Amino acid sequence: MTGFGPEEWQAVALSLRVSFWATLFSLPLGIFAAYALARWRFPGKQLFNGLVHLPLILPPVVTGYLLLLAFGRQGPLGQILEPLGIVLAFRWTGAALAAAVMAFPLMVRAIRLSIEAVDPRLEAAAATLGAAPWRVFATVTLPLILPGILAGAILAFAKAMGEFGATITFVSNIPGQTQTIPSAIYAFLQIPGGESAAARLVLVSVVIALAALLLSEVVARRVARRVGAA
């Protein structure tokens, strides 16, 4: 794209990388959490539900600060992970973690609504035929909730692309290392003459978000048609 400098390209590439890994690694946990909330009864369910949705309520800066306390070099989890070669604070991996935490509630909600729309009698019928719970989920529930999983993944990806507060608090704003598109826009707006670069990144953000939404709509419809024809 004409006029793009190296720092802008780095921000775009890093945002795509962070959003991809944030979505990929949180998806299995998101499916598990959504299924637990939709189908299981257990003590502390409301507390668990509150914890899952807590990032939607807390200011993003608070979430980032809590991540820094927990996963920083002096934090309890950070001290456990560092000897294993895993450092999250002020690294792009930390940006992915922050983005995943902030996007997680949206992912869970979309998948949960999809699971709740599945008739439990279908799962019960498979169970009465002798199928194990994992097989019931894999052969009955999972195919029916694929559109919801896709919607949740796309929502999480889009949210991760736009995450700013938690990311900048946890991993700072280091060009080429932790500077995502929102952080780069903020940085460019703080310097004279940076408005044009910020505007280009805003345009890129809009294009990526629209492309993701259109892609999710197309794929979700195809999956829904295949499930309906099965």
Image (spheres, rainbow, N blue to C red):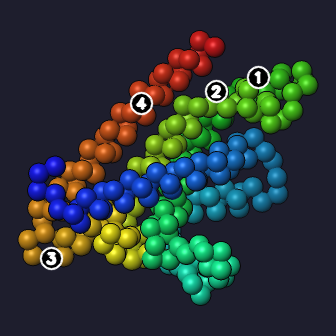
Q: Amino acid at mark 4?
A: Glu
Q: Secondary structure at mark 1?
A: helix
Asked whether the residues under the numbered discs 1 and 2 touch, taking CB atoms below 8 Å apart as contact, a structural biologist would say yes
Q: Amino acid at mark 1?
A: Leu
- Residue at label 2? 144
Q: Amino acid at mark 2?
A: Leu
Quadrant of the rendered structure where residue 183 is? bottom left
Disc 2 versus disc 4: distance between alpha carbons?
A: 16 Å
Left or right side of 176 for 46? right
Quadrant of the rendered structure where residue 117 is? top right
Disc 1 versus disc 4: distance between alpha carbons?
A: 26 Å
8 or 223, which lies in front?
A: 8
Q: Nearer the viewer, mark 3 or mark 1?
A: 3
- Residue at label 4? 217
Question: Residue 106: x, y in percent?
Answer: 52, 50
Question: Residue 175: x, y in percent?
Answer: 30, 72
> In the rendering, which numbered label is found on residue 191?
3
